[in-house]
Image (cartoon, grey):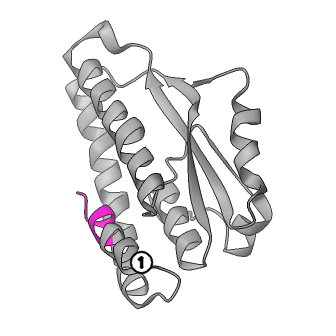
């Protein structure tokens, strides 16, 4: 990953809100023209960040911390037990710990980090398998607390159920 020169300034500006504990920027694929796999990953990033994350932010749903191109308030993350070492999707796990505790993730479309996408089917399959296992770990851990949560609205609960079961 190669962050923009001013990514810190763009991300930190949103952390002034006491309810925002994490900020998530946009990930842009820099090796998109390489082959079909990199083109598909680039399309997935545009859909996931520029459309999905932005829509979740605007609709008051659950923007997801993606682990890259982001930042967080360390004291809040530590208060909630830090990044989970028992989950392959520690970024998704953190997202749900935060929302369940009454905090938010803020998506910042203007801040970008450039990535080299996986460029073979085997790499793509291994990466997505790891993400699928991590999401299922998070679903098992957070699904019942999400349903019972008093900090989440009904539309956030519905979004959370879909997000946790995406795979």
Q: Nearer the viewer, residue 10 or 5?
A: 10
Q: Quadrant of residue 133?
A: bottom left
Residue 14 at x, y percent in the picture: 70, 49
> In terms of image quadrants, where is residue 3?
top right
Residue 49 place in picture, x, y as percent: 41, 39
Q: Residue at x 29, y 44 (%)?
A: 128
Q: Residue at x 57, y 65 (%)?
A: 84
Residue in the picture at 58% in, 31% down: 110
Instruction: Say left or right for 2 vs 128.
Output: right
Q: Residues within 10 Å of mark 1 (few under 14, many from 20)?
A: some
Q: Which residue is identified by label 1? A: 142
Q: Observer-nearest residue: 125 or 66? A: 66
Residue 31 % position (x, y): 39, 13
Percent across and percent down for residue 147 are 36, 86
Secondary-structure class at tag 1: helix
Q: Which residues are magenta?
A: 161-167
Q: Is residue 50 left or right of residue 9?
A: left
User: Relative to 25, is 93 above or below?
Assistant: below
Quadrant of the image containing the N terminus: top right
Outermost residue, top direction? 33
In the image, residue 166 lies in the stretch drawn in magenta: yes
Residue 58 sits inside the magenta stretch: no
Residue at horizontal 31%, vertical 36%?
Answer: 47
For the C terminus, the quadrant is: bottom left
């Amino acid at each position: 990953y190669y962050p923009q020169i001013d990514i810190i300034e763009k991300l930190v500006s949103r952390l002034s809100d006491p309810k925002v504990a994490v900020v998530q920027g946009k990930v842009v694929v820099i090796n998109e023209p390489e082959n079909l796999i990199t083109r598909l990953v680039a399309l997935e990033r545009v859909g996931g960040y520029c459309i999905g994350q932005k829509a979740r932010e605007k609709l008051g749903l659950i923007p997801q911390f993606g682990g890259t191109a982001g930042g967080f308030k360390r004291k809040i993350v530590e208060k909630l037990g830090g990044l989970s070492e028992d989950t392959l999707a520690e970024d998704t796990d953190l997202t749900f710990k935060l929302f369940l505790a009454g905090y938010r993730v803020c998506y910042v479309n203007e801040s970008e980090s450039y990535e080299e996408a996986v460029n073979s089917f085997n790499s793509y399959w291994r990466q997505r398998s790891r993400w699928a296992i991590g999401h299922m770990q998070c679903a098992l851990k957070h699904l019942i607390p999400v349903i019972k949560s008093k900090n989440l609205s009904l539309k956030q609960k519905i979004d959370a159920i879909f997000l946790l079961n995406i795979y």
